Amino acid sequence: MKQWRLSHRILLLALAPMWIITMLLTGMVAIVGTSQIDGALKDRGALIARHLSSACEYGAFSGNREVLQALTQATLKEEDAQGVVVTDPANRILAASGKLELVDQPLIQAALKGSIRHGAHGGLIFGAPIYQGMPAADNFDLIDHGRTEPAGKPKLLGFVFVELSTASSQQAKILFVFVCLLIGAVGTAGASYFAFRMSRDLTRPLSRLIDGVHGMAKGEFSIRIKADSGGELQDLEEGFNLMAAEVENSHNKMLEVNANLEHLVAARTRELELKNQDLEYLSNTDRLTGLFNRLRLETILEEEHIRSQRYGSHFSIALIDVDKFKSINDTFGHSAGDQVLVSIGIILQENIRSIDAVGRWGGEEFLVIFRETDLDDALIISEKLREAIATHAFHMVGYRTASFGVTCYRHPDSILEMMIRADNALYQAKNKGRNLVQFEIH
């Protein structure tokens, strides 16, 4: 996108949100509207079935099929009605009008539950039971009836089934969606037109400004641009012309100063680079041992953690603590203790790979980061480091040992979890007698 022309970028920034919002609103309105159309058809069918079941109570109780037939014919005149059937409790048809599928057990169960069945020809079948002396249950929550307890279990007289065609509702949904799309298209077209106008009004004066800047960059300080865009853009154009005039007047003086300034800048830049190098070294290095300090180690840990999460690679760490270090300070003095830390730092640095990192974690603790290394290899290297320390004769204090706590990265470990495991492993090494390499992976 950075390589696009400014006019194209302005158009994209103006049109993309508008198109997205228009499509979302159009889709939302279409979905809600079609859902309401479907819901209206279902509510009407449930209401017809409920009222028909109440009306058929007398005919079903008395066995008067003429009354039931008249009711089915009257119901068939309802909009979208294409079949009406009244049955007795044994599923025998008492009256029927129009076309309706055969009444089977699934239809009976649906009528008892107040649910809707889909017909074989795309219609919706609504059923309701006929009870003696009891209003039909409003299973579709169309009317809020009062809660009354019946005196006894009502007698089932039969069932009514009404099938409504979905053809008209489908046409209504298609028309509604078409209108929504049409309105969205018109809105999009109108907004696109204004976006094109805005892009042109912005990019035309900007193009002139860019041409003027390019001319000045080539040394054409006498260049001026036409200032007739109006508003803030015209102020910008006039400001550019004033700037160009000032630059042209100052050009000769700047040439004289430039030579001296370049020399001064070069000297200051070199001085700053040297100071930055010293500052970087001090900020990343432990003053006593010359190894990485804790801040630098934390940065490396974060880099390895991110790389392992992204590429699925491995890395391991070893937390090292000098055994009985306090006794060295108490017996030989702090300077001897410092010399032991320096020597251990040298031993660690000389016995790890060039890709690994070692530093002073704090006090008498060191941390080694084994890049691209699983737990088994980390344990092998840690054992080598432990033996190198244990076999080294330190000045004044003789032989000393160190304990190791080792762990490795297991997705989705955090750095804190790894450090806790390494610290636990180090604690186990101390408890088991020191001068040991212990590991923990869970």
Image: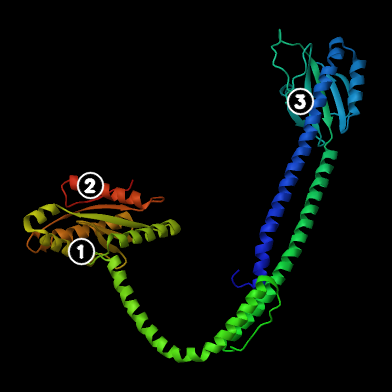
Residue 438: x %, y % from top left: 24, 50
Query: Residue 345 got which mark?
Result: 1
Residue 217: x %, y % from top left: 56, 85
Q: Earlier in the sequence, mark 1 or mark 2?
A: 1
17 sits left or right of 135 in the view: left
Q: Earlier in the sequence, mark 3 or mark 2?
A: 3
Write the residue at 30% across / 70% down: 279
Mark 1 neighbour density, 10 Å: few (under 14) some (14–19) many (20 or more): many
Q: SS class of the residue under badge 1?
A: helix
Front tag of 1 and 3: 1
Q: Is residue 305 above or below residue 417?
A: below
Q: Label 2 sits on what residue type? A: Tyr
Q: Label 1 sits on what residue type? A: Gly
Query: Residue 107 got which mark?
Result: 3
Q: How far apart are the alpha carbons under marks 1 and 3?
A: 85 Å
Q: How far apart are the alpha carbons under marks 1 and 2?
A: 21 Å
- The reply to whether residue 55 is visible in this rendering is yes
**Nearest the camera: 234 or 294?**
234
Q: Earlier in the sequence, mark 1 or mark 3?
A: 3
Query: Residue 5 got which mark?
Result: none
Examine the image and state in which quarter residue 260 appears: bottom left
